[in-house]
Amino acid sequence: MDPAVLPILSCPRCRAGAPFSDLRTPRCSACGLEPASASAGFIDLIDVSVGEPPLTTTEQRLMESDLVARVYDRFWRPTFVRLFAGAGAGAAVGGLSGELFIHKHGLSIDDRPGPWLDLSCGPGAFARALAAAAPGALIVGLDISRAMLDVAAQRTGGYTNVVLVRADAHALPFVDGAFGGVNNAGALHAYDYPELVFREIRRVLRPGGHYVGSTFAEAPSLFGRLAARAAGIRRFAPSELRAWLQRIGFADYEDVRLGGALVFRVRRP
Ligand SMILES: C[S@@+](CC[C@H](N)C(=O)[O-])C[C@H]1O[C@@H](n2cnc3c(N)ncnc32)[C@H](O)[C@@H]1O
């Protein structure tokens, strides 16, 4: 695991910066917290003294399934993107590869230094794309699901610049201004409190850094609306998202529509 991550970590319990001197047997130098070691392929920074975060939605529970994590990129994601955002969401840009292109472009990864955070990385498709695009930069993939991180660890194994972290997006275990950019694909609807996550993203971004996210906007059909409602999928109107992000202190909101989904970008001033 790339030791370049050590200076940007913060302790999930006492919030001290750079709390660990190594990742094999991490121990916080300020409060003594000993998170699970990185031997599983990811470093587990859930504060066990507080307990595991509750899984409040069906989707969150499904994301803990080994089977869902294994079939996610090929089957799960394309099926549900089509169902909840219409055929245009994938077809217009050539499916996941097109979306990856938009996200990489939105982050300006070729022109800026990292490190880069792939927030709620799932099985790691975006983290892999970022690692290939920026071989000299550190890429941190973060997710709360062990099943997703297990698969991400297998699939990013060939990239020495990828570090995987288990943590909650509502309380990111990184120092202020740690990242040059934050990628956050298809996960806003999964958070209990998006506002807290936006504030955390702003905090861990360096001034000038971009936050690129994608989410469900408009329902393509009555069937899609009903299916999304039954699954508890929240939709974000672009005007609502823009006002929300501006209020939190982001600037330069832009978005691209992909059927009923949207990819947006903002900048931390
Ligand atoms: C729909 S998947 C998207 C995965 C990937 N970014 C992609 O676009 O293919 C949503 C991801 O958000 C993660 N997630 C849900 N709640 C989270 C939280 N509170 N903190 C971090 N990750 C979370 C889930 O475990 C899941 O991997």
Image (tube, rainbow, N blue to C red):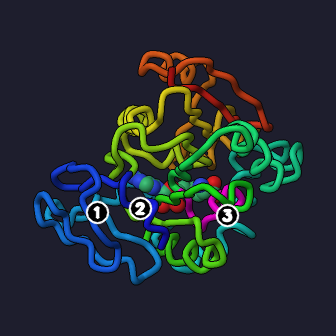
Q: What is the x, y in percent for residue 167? A: 36, 59
Disc number for residue 46: 1
Separation of residues labelled 3 and 1 (CA atoms)? 23 Å
Locate residue 109 relative to residue 39 in the image: left or right: right
Vertical comparison of 83 with 182: above or below: below
For disc 3, the neighbor class at 10 Å (few under 14, some 14 to 19, many from 20) is many
Vertical comparison of 70 with 263: above or below: below
Image point (61%, 48%), residue name: 186
Say whether disc 2 or disc 1 marks the residue closer to the N-terminus: 1
Label 3–label 1 contact, CB within 8 A:
no
Q: Secondary structure at mark 3?
A: helix
Q: Which residues are magenta?
A: 121-131
Label 2–label 1 contact, CB within 8 A:
yes
| Type of secondary structure dominating the magenta stretch | helix
Q: Secondary structure at mark 2?
A: loop
Separation of residues labelled 2 and 1 (CA atoms)? 8 Å
Vertical comparison of 137 with 45: above or below: above
Residue topped by disc 3? 128
Does 130 lie within the magenta span? yes
Label 3–label 2 contact, CB within 8 A:
no
Disc number for residue 144: 2
Name the quadrant containing residue 170: top left
Mark 2 close to ligand 1, CB under 8 Å: yes
Query: Between tags 3 and 1, which lies in front?
Result: 3
Q: Secondary structure at mark 1?
A: loop
Query: Between tags 3 and 2, which lies in front?
Result: 3
